[in-house]
Image (cartoon, grey):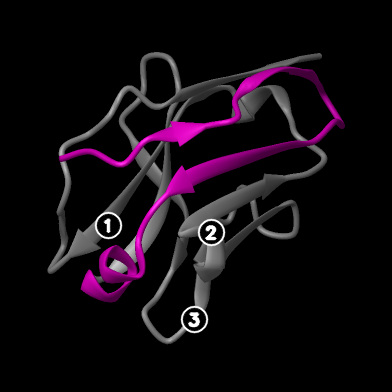
Amino acid sequence: VQLQASGGGSVQAGGSLRLSCAASEGSLRLGVMGWYRQAPGKQRELVAGILRGGRTKYAESVKGRFTISRDPAKSTVYLQMNNVEPEDTGVYYCNVEVDGRSFYEWGQGTQVTVSS
């Protein structure tokens, strides 16, 4: 089972994108719902997460620019990306972390390309 991320594309530096991930409330109750990024030649990293109580956490590199949120009515988790930078380029994935491990298989992700 995979969670599907969507909404990627090409954008210029300083622009915005909103990514979406279809995730049921059941998925959100499992653990930390996160957005991950894999840049070319680098390991996948967590950029934003939302905990079961609703608290959020962010990688230092995206603090103040990215916002993770959820819409239970639409069973969707979003990643609002503002003021993007070329360093934000990569494939973005969503998954749930349970006891330090990814719960779902990794999907194809969605490509984000930021040009300077």
Determine crowd level at label 3: few under 14, some 14-19, many 20+ residues with C-alpha closer than 10 A.
few
Q: Which residue is the site of mark 3?
A: 54
Which numbered tag is attached to residue 109? Answer: none
Q: Quadrant of residue 106?
A: top left
Query: In the structure shown, which secondary structural element does the residue marked by tag 3 occupy?
Result: loop
Q: Is 25 contained in the magenta span? A: yes
Q: Judge from the rendering whether residue 8 lies leftward or rightward of residue 40; answer left or right.
A: right
The reply, left or right, for residue 12 in relation to residue 102 is: right
Magenta-highlighted residues: 1-30
Q: Amino acid at mark 2?
A: Lys
Identify the residue position indicated by label 1 in the image: 96
Point 35% across, 61% down: residue: 24
Mark 2 and mark 1: Cα distance apart in space: 18 Å
78 shown above or below 14: below
Check residue 84 for magenta coloring.
Answer: no
- Name the residue type under label 1: Val
Q: Mark 3 vs mark 2: which is more N-terminal?
A: 3
Label whose residue precedes the other's in the sequence (2 or 1):
2
Q: Is residue 21 above or below residue 11?
A: below
- Dot 1 alpha-carbon crowd within 10 angstroms: few under 14, some 14 to 19, many 20 or more: many
Q: Quadrant of the C terminus?
A: top right
Question: Front-most of 27 and 33?
Answer: 27
Depth check: give the residue in front, 23 or 93: 23
Q: Observer-nearest residue: 111 or 64?
A: 111
For badge 3, the amino acid type reads Gly
Q: Residue at x 27, y 63 (%)?
A: 27
User: Residue 45 appears at what percent x and percent y?
Assistant: 37, 42
Does residue 75 appear to the left or right of 116 in the view shown?
left
Label located before the other in sequence (3 or 1): 3
Q: Say what secondary structure mark 2 lies in.
A: helix
